[in-house]
Amino acid sequence: MLQAAAHLRSVFPHTRRRSGWLAKLACTVALSVGTAQPLLAQSGPTLHFPAAPDTLSAELFYQLLLAEFQLQNQDPGAAYSLMLDAAKRTQRPELYRRAVEIALQNRAGNAALTAARDWSAAFPDADEPYRYELQILLALNRPADVSRTLRNLIRLTPAERRSEVISAIPQTLARTSDRDAALAAARDALQPALRDPATAAAAWAAIGRMELERAAPQAALAAARSALQAQGNSAYGAALAVELFEREVPGAEPLVQAYLQRTAGTAVEHRSTIHLAYIRALIDLRRLADAQHELEQLLTLEPDQAQAWLLQGILLTQQRRATAAEAALERYLELSRELPPDEARPGQTQAFLHLAQIAEQRGDFDAANAWLDRIENADDILSAQIRRATILARQGHIEQARELIRRQPERTDADTRRKLLAEAHLLREVKAYEAAYETFTAAAQRFPDDPDLIYEQALAAERTGRFETMEALLRDLIARHPDYHHAYNALGYSLADRNERLEEAKSLIQKALAVAPNDAHILDSLGWVEFRLGNKQEALRILQDAFRRLPDAEIAAHLGEVHWALGQQDAALNVWREGLLLNPENETLLNTLQRLRVQP
């Protein structure tokens, strides 16, 4: 810095009498040169550049100063040319960087790309110019040109981190509009990685994710299969297979199951993470019995796996197995003390909420509130207060419960949405259907582009006997969101339950099932419409499958009625009893027993 100032005085002896902006420019020049190497050292692995002189020649310093002057004087083109010329003559990386930055600051993308490529040509074993190249190419939306850049970035990454960098490629290229060009470039860049046994699995998984983004699930499945063939215990290939399974791509689940069987009892890194992801996917797909089985398998292999105990507790709570659920959740809380606080807190909140729910179901409202008192983080207070409102409502204090929800702060639109939904669900739970409909309607008006809210509004309309309104809302939802399968199912089930337009009802439900073939609720609707059509044996087969996938009180109501209609009274009573254990307050089940005058 001192040497740079001495050069300045020798070239411009009158500098001291000039205003402060020139001194500021001199500092800019000196700092851009003097601090470059430490910043590079911080940004990644050590880079080795050709030796550069410790001081600037008077001629070079003048050129750099002139470049900065031209930039201040609103002539970025001249500034860029001077800086790039200086970089080429001196082969100093910090000057190439400054040329790139000048071009970027002035939105001259092609000029920035030229400077970055000149930089990488001068320093082919430095990763920074290639990182700039990649960012510029993506900003220019030129995914077809990134292949060489990606290949060099992979080459320059240390071997132990190479798979990690490869796995980030799909996300890096996700913002490009031409997904086909991005995939072609990535495939070309990954050819060396595909031939290397150490990186082949990560490379195939990256290709598979990009195939999935361009809506080619079968090609993504083939890539996942190749990843697992290249490395049987690859977390990259297995994670892609789980993602495909979650999207219900046929053939994905056997890949996941084979991976889990192959790695069972081994110390394969990330195995438990893959297993947990598979279990969560099963839960999302409402295959609760299968999820329960997988949890038991995982806990047998890893009895101290905290997240598995949390999922176990949540599943058991849903099944109303209170004692076992409490034991699982308390075991999670014990194990979570060893987790990092940021990782433990969301799970602990879930555990406290479910323990409060169990106490509430027992009628022990003091214990429920005591569990909620243990939720202290500000981000989780809304969840706790919504649970408190439910407790108040169950005690008959409906208006107090609504007021508790309403006075919670709203920091985001998401908070507003949660509050409206919580109030509406609370009103529906206490059978205040008219008020629930009004609240769902207010929520749908507040967020008119949210299909879930319109769906909830339609279901609430049905509860109040507004069948025409329900149908209009659902048909409008189908027109706006043709892939929203819940709307097809809800309309089909409503028609079947009212014994109206049964062939149309069946067609609607089949459309929903085509999108989600393993959804137990949709299978329940199909079984019910078959029963209404008089196809009792087919109804029995479908409803038994649905109840196996998802033990649920409403499915039990329908399955039991089919058994009863077939003269299988013992089987009907057994199913109904099981349904009452699952949920003794289920309205469909209670109405079925009352209508058939049955005491199970």
Image (cartoon, grey):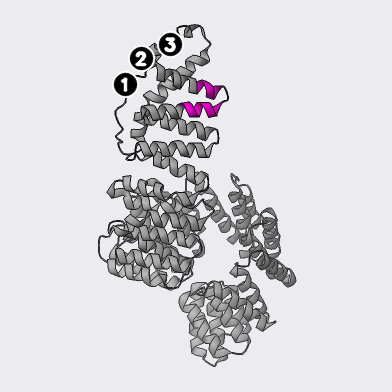
Measured Cα–Cα span from mark 1 to mark 3: 18 Å
459 over 371 or under it: above or below: below
Q: What residue is rendered at 55% in x and 86% in y?
A: 539
Which amino acid does the dot numbered 1 rest on? Asp
Q: What residue is rendered at 42% in x and 32% in y?
A: 97
Q: Is residue 121 left or right of residue 457?
A: left
**Residue 42 horizontal/vertical position (percent):** 35, 34
Q: Magenta stretch containing residue 78, yes or no?
A: yes
**Residue 344 horizontal/vertical position (percent):** 39, 50
Is the residue under label 2 in contact with that under label 1 (CB below 8 Å)?
yes
What is the secondary structure assignment of the residue under circle 1?
loop
In the image, 545 versus 54, the foreground residue is 54
Q: What residue is rendered at 40% in x and 57% in y?
A: 187
Residue 201 image-quadrant placement: bottom left
Is the residue under label 3 in contact with that under label 1 (CB below 8 Å)?
no
Which amino acid does the dot numbered 2 rest on? Gln
| Residue carrying label 3 | 11
| Residue carrying label 2 | 3
Question: How many numbered dots are placed on residues in this image?
Answer: 3
Q: What is the magenta range? A: 68-82
